[in-house]
Amino acid sequence: MPATSKATRESHARVFDLDVSSLRELNQALHNLTPGSNETAWEVLNPKGNHSVAVGVDQPVSIDVRGSVGYYCGGMNSGSTITVHGSAGPGVGENMMSGSIVIKGDASQYAGATGKGGLLVIEGNASSRCGISMKGIDIVVHGNIGHMSAFMAQSGNLVVLGDAGDALGDSIYEARLFVRGKVDSLGADCIAKEMRPEHLELLQGLLDRAGLTGVKPSEFKRYGSARTLYNFNIDNADAY
Amino acid sequence: MCGIVGLFLKDKALEPKLGAMLSEMLVSLSDRGPDSAGIAIYGATAGNEAKITIQSPKPERDFRGLDAELAKALGAPVSIAVKSTHAVIRTTPDKVDAAREALQSLRPDVRVMGAGEAVEIYKEVGLPEAVVDRFDVRKMTGTHGIGHTRMATESAVTTMGAHPFSTGADQCLVHNGSLSNHNNVRRELVREGMKFETENDTEVAAAYLSSQIAHGKNLGEALEGTLSDLDGFFTFVVGTKNGFGVVRDPIACKPAVMAETDQYVAFGSEYRALTKLPGIDNARVWEPEPATVYFWEH
């Protein structure tokens, strides 16, 4: 890994400049990490919309990406803390297992898709299909989310400080959706639900984890499954 | 997949670099589509002059002596500039239709890529790098342009199946996606008298826009019509003589990102395509909304 020998930008941080090193070198170096490694701080320069930056990291290191990334940044993340100081392309944090990803700018389509755990924070807006098929991940969006978000969402929490686009939570299972702004429309089988004390407490915890202050859980509405699509209803037979 | 790009300059100082900037954008998206690539450049208009971009499978045979033969057939001055498999014919604007007709008998294998006062269209099978090199696109100047790198789905990998598609004067279109009702729409347009060169779905979208514009709609209204009349997946980037437009279908799965500064408006399938543009770090960068028409005009 010749490019890493000039790691001097931050003390102790291992620096990869993607203008100099290949993406494969970066990801291989991250995959070579073993438990207890002292190389806990990483910095990636000049990502320039590259795909798959820091995909499949499975050690608790912190990775600062200086710029905007393309598809699938931080996909399958397991335990690392990734901060993108820019915007992210489609599928950021796809299938994340644990750890956290913070996007300082906007995120494109299907952010956090199929995520099983961990925390994804988008400080700008997210696009369509945010949290599609989420399976336990927590997603906090400071801005708005696009249409078809949380489609078939199974579990986990989606928190949106801004507005949601059309067909929010279509065919949703047991994920919880908290939206502070307006919702253009709800998808099939998604309904507004009562905000009980346990939900206020849960939401406060999520806001705390995302480092948000000055935002009250009581400002949000909760949405979830009406559970009418769980079982086949003979009255709907004509629809098939 | 497919990759599409577009660049609309506001700052005249960038015009000499249009070809180089657009080429760089397109080459950066090569891995979105290795089958073929194409670019349309809107150059300066030279008053009383029209340009017809033609292509031949046998350029040495077809382009030799064509200027004199065509000038004789048209009774008007004709010049021809050859670039590899393509050539740009220049003549007076009132002779464009006659030139198309004359070409059919003079050079039956020649295909017209597009015509107008401003546009030149170059497209071939191969990677973007090879295509922009072949036609020396980097040296081209202009006000705006669009480009495409293709991963074929709906029709064969041929020169004529590559984008951009042009079906009206100075109008052309690139497309990422696939249309599902193109056969029906094609039949309707054929009944109106539109002519088609291929079985390609995108050519139908281009012809649809040309037909709408011929019926008196402006670019924005024509693009609006695609949302109700075309079925399927699409992100379209469209060029006209002095305009540039973008529209995505309501589902909007085909990616799109735009950037605007005081100097330009740029479109890319991915942010990667925009990273080398001047001032990109301070540009307004956003994703065009689904089912929303965007267009700019000089």
Image (cartoon, grey):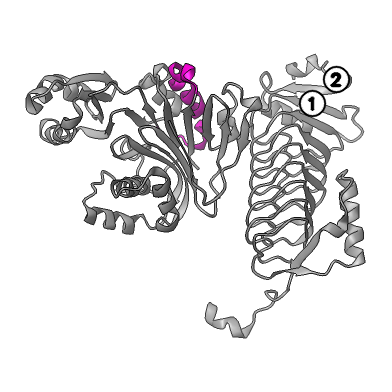
The quarter holding residue B128 reads top left
In the rendered structure, find residue B36 and report the number of the disc placed on it: none
> Disc 2 is attached to a residue of which chain?
A
Q: Amino acid at mark 1?
A: Glu
Q: Tell me which residue sits at (11%, 30%) in the image.
A: B106
Front residue of B24 and A164: A164
Dot 2 falls on a residue whose secondary structure is: loop
For badge 2, the amino acid type reads Glu
The residue carrying mark 1 is A43
Q: Which residues are magenta?
A: B11-38
**Contact (Cβ within 8 Å) of mark 2 with mark 1:** yes
Query: Vertical placement of A130 versus A50: above or below?
Result: below
* Percent position of residue A3, x then y: 74, 17
The answer to whether B83 appears left or right of A88 in the picture is left
The reply to whether residue B150 is in sight is no
Residue B110 placement: quadrant? top left
Q: Considering only vertical position in the picture, is A173 above or below B55?
A: below
Q: Which residue is mark 2?
A: A10
Q: Is residue A50 left or right of residue A134?
A: left
Give percent across and percent down for residue B82.
25, 19
Between B106 and A76, the one nearer to me in the picture: B106
Is residue A86 inside the magenta stretch? no
**In the image, residue A174 lies at what x, y percent?**
77, 66
Secondary structure mainly formed by the magenta segment: helix
